[in-house]
Image: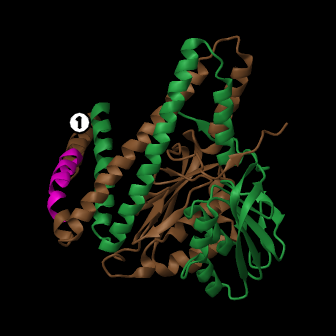
Amino acid sequence: MTAVALVLGFLVVAQLRGQVADASLSQQSAQDLTLLIANLNTHNEQLRGDIATLEQQLADLTDSHSRGDSAADQLRAELAQIQGWAGLRAVQGPGITIQVAGEISGEGVEDLLNELRNAGAEAISIGGVRVVPGSVVAGAAGALSIENTPLSGTFEILAIGSPQILTGSLTRAGGIIAQLSVTFPDAQISVTPLEAIAIPATDRNLAPVNGKPSL
Amino acid sequence: MTAVARRLRELPSWQVTLSAALLVLGFLVAAQLSAEGPRIRYTSQERVPLVETVIGLQTQQDSLKDRILALRAQIGDLEAELPASAAQEKALNAELEQARIASGLAQLAGPGLVFKLEDADGALGNANADGLVTARDVRILIQELWLAGAEAISVNGERITTTTAVLDIGNSILVNSAYLAPPYQITAIGPTDLYDRVSGSASFVEFVTSRVDPSGIRLSFAEIESVTVPAFAGTVSGRYIKPSAPAP
């Protein structure tokens, strides 16, 4: 009985997912499909690179393990990488600084952050506050805050990544800054590439209370 | 009528359930088979190979992500099997576990809320642009959930992390570079009164009254005792970012 239910459930999900996604794809224009293909190719390449790194890591660990050697260095390196990425540790690197002045809503700033991530920003801070899942810039224009820290009239966004790609992506014609200047004509947003940026760790406690690891 | 009803009630319930299950099963198999025809009819000549390429790449992407998750699990398991005397390594390993859980690299289960966002009825066919769900709509719901105290969020299985971008592509969205088609299920784990907190937010009410209602896009929700938010299966390594020394 449960077996039938299981197969049924699986088929339902597979059927719905397959039909919905494929039906949706067949509605896209050739141009969007081409864009999607480029996107998928880039991402798949990135994932292959990650797999190679992880396989090397696994091989190194297996080596130390079988030789009875200390894996402390490897553990420290992995910890540093995960904490750096997640916002649990301060980080440094090249990137850009964005000065934001004038009237812009929390929504507008969030759109800007989304574009920064799209352009490959690897760490972001606003007004000195590290942006992590859970931090949201909220409020009406002139009354912005992030994580209970009010953002003054002119505030700074720092982002670590490729200074050229970040700058180019944000400032291109029709890009996010151009769009924001239409919605918020009184806002001034300027981008400057920087060689060395320091972004602090988050003050937020990211450990889940209601969620427990499953699997 | 009542004689039939009585007869139906007398049937052992498992027989009724089984027949219903088999009926639905039969329907699904038939639907799957018949889905082949209509799908090809909708696409024009030039788009068929493009769609097939996308599907192929997505299948590749899915297996690459599965491989990443499997490797991370193997690494975690290996790191956990440390000799009892290696106190330092044990401490590092514990920190690593905590970092994985806090950063989105671990699947979580807990009380939560699921929002479902769908295009307005018939919006796609009628070229009713307003009635199509945009990436922005999804981002606004995600922001509202964070503000209300959510601890972990995923959209159609894609975990929201520090580097996650939610983008428009045609009439669908990309999350973590994965192509997602509507309906969008935004799953969040958080305090048991999460929905009350979200619905009490002025900006959420504004979103519903000025965007959802007028456009006809459909927003529904369910509060669930235990939802699962999957692990992030993507890149955590950065090319420009360098972690600083740990705080003393």
Q: Main secondary structure of the magenta part?
A: helix
Q: Where B103 falls versus A128 (above or below)?
A: above
Q: Residue A208: tell me if it is visible.
A: no
Residue, disc 1: B15
Specify the chain shown as green: A
Any magenta on residue B35?
yes
Q: Where A107 falls versus B198 (above or below)?
A: below
Q: Residues within 10 Å of mark 1 (few under 14, many from 20)?
A: few
Of the chain colours in the picture, the one used for chain B is brown
Q: Residue at x 77, y 72 (%)?
A: A144
Q: How is the image coloured?
A: by chain
Q: Say left or right for B186 vs B87.
A: left
Region rendered in magenta: B24-38
Q: Residue at x 73, y 82 (%)?
A: A188
Q: Position of residue B112 (x, y in %)?
A: 58, 49
Depth check: B212 or B184 in front?
B184
Label 1 secondary element: helix
Question: Disc 1: which chain?
Answer: B
Q: Quadrant of residue A157?
A: bottom right
Q: Residue A144: tell me if it is visible.
A: yes
Q: Say left or right for B73 vs A15.
A: right
Q: Quadrant of the N terminus of chain A?
A: top left
